[in-house]
Amino acid sequence: MRAVITGGAGFLGSHLCDKLIAEGWDVLCLDNLITGTESNIAHLMSHPRFRAARQDVTRYIDVPGPVDYVLHFASPASPVDYLKLPIQTLKVGALGTHNSLGLALAKKAKYFLASTSECYGDPQISPQPETYWGHVNPIGPRGVYDEAKRFAEAMTMAYHRAHGVNTHIVRIFNTYGPRMRLNDGRALPNFVYQALRGDAITVYGDGKQTRSFCYVSDLIDGIYKLMLSDEHEPTNIGNPQEITILEFARRVRDLLGAKTEIIFNPLPVDDPKQRCPDISKAKRLLQWEPKVSLDEGLRLTLDFFKKQYAAESARAK
């Protein structure tokens, strides 16, 4: 089996490359490295079943030879990235989805879209089931990411219905683990970076907004099971254990043994007040649910971040 993974040098894409290689697949990673990094896939470069190519998937994708599966994971994913790269984010959700679906259609391959819980926007119900249509501001600053993914889902279902492409869609909830970029704008890397520097930890709003954090190995396991299923409509994959951002910041600070204070800044525009997946569909269809506890996952991730911070500090000297 041969898979093409767009965004394969990103945080999630690189872990997916690992998983498919471990399962015996041939993998072609396509990435323009706007937010991905070669270091995420450096350990795979000598593997006989892995190949990487520099590719902007908003342009025509030409892949010689047979392809069995196209997995579209290319997109800026943190608020810092998609607010800095709004046009690129919209283009990879629209043109990148169109081009990768075109590749799947031409190769008679299965197709997998990495969508997001941000399709639910600032939700009016919690936890969020797949049947909820969302509460999204299409012209707000976050709309470039939210609406790009909503369009990508619509395009994917159109190719399924109009062309018979065997498509799958995952809605990914907050995920963390090794290979996240320090200080990338998401809660965990920000908290860790600030604590390691001895800076005050910044919490937005009053910190009572909630998130649900899924360790990356659990997410990739759920994605792989969904890949092999017969389900075509969106499926939530995430951890339903909710925690407030303030409690999360305290947990990270305590695990790092930091003594820094926590300060509060204004809440960003359209920031979701709650984010929690209803995973009853994944449990029923895939027999999947997360296994890694928050404390265990944080310990593994913090070890990675501390090594990354030490390496960056050494280079700066």
Image (cartoon, rainbow, N blue to C red):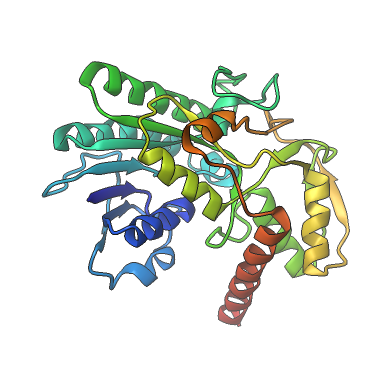
Q: Residue at x 77, y 42 (%)?
A: 243
Query: Does any portion of residue 199 appear in the rendered image?
Result: no
Viewer-proximal residue among 277 and 191: 277
- Counting every numbered tag in the picture gives 0
Q: How far across and how far down the image is residue 175, in percent?
A: 59, 48
Name the residue rendered at 34%, 26% in the picture: 156
At horizontal 63% and vertical 33% (from top left) the residue drawn is 277
Which quarter of the rendered picture does the C terminus lie within? bottom right
Q: Whole-percent x and y of residue 198?
A: 80, 68
Q: Is residue 153 left or right of residue 301?
A: left
Question: Quick check: 47 left or right of 290?
Answer: left
- Can the viewer see residue 27 in this picture? yes
Quarter of the image holding residue 184? bottom right
- Above or below, 191 against 113 in this view is below
Image quadrant where residue 254 sits: bottom right
Relative to residue 226, is residue 298 depicted above or below? below
